[in-house]
Image (spheres, grey):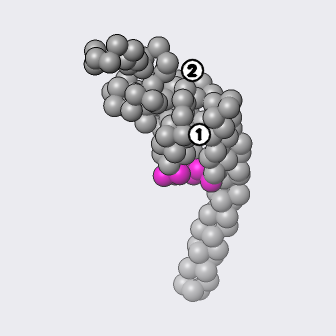
Amino acid sequence: MKTLKIFITLFAIMAFADVNAQKATKEELSIKVSSQCSMCKETIEKALAFEKGIVEAELDLETDIVKVVYKSGKTTPEKIRKAISDVGYDADDVPANKEAYNNLPDCCKKPEDQQHDHSGHKH
């Protein structure tokens, strides 16, 4: 009888785990980002590669759209946008983390924030 109870308990746990695994379906998301160059592409894709639940991320520099495939049971669009913001880029309506943005190389900053030196002297 004790063995039967253990078996039933284990079966219930396995069935519950299987139901939860099925809830983590793959979703696609497109996010407009403030990328400027290939370094931006590398930074954003690398950051997303380390985020839990993200299966794939690819940034198109022509459109500044990053397409993300993720497991909905593991992460959310909000967490993905925050991960992009945390490395210094705008992600749809989520502004870039100011400190991370300020630490980006000049070529990765928005054109209005880049230090253009036409005189030969540093500003």
Residue type highlighted by circle 2: Asp
Identify the mark at residue 76; answer none if there is no mark: 1
Q: Residue at x 64, y 74 (%)?
A: 11
Residue 101, label in figure: none
Whether residue 5 is visible here, answered yes or no, is no
Q: Residue at x 49, y 18 (%)?
A: 111
Q: Which quadrant is the N terminus positioned in?
A: bottom right
Check if residue 106 falls in the magenta segment: no
- Quick check: can you spot residue 76? yes
For this rendering, which residue is in front, 19 or 43? 43
In-front residue for pair 3/104:
104
Residue 36 image point, x, y percent: 54, 29
Secondary element at tag 1: loop
- Identify the residue at horizontal 59%, vertical 68% (top origin): 13
Q: Is residue 15 above or below residue 88?
A: below
Picture coordinates of residue 120, whole percent (x, y): 32, 18
Task: Indicate the position of residue 18 as horizontal and vertical percent values.
Answer: 67, 64
Instruction: Give the labeled residue for mark 2.
Output: 93
Q: For this view, does 123 lie left or right of residue 74? A: left
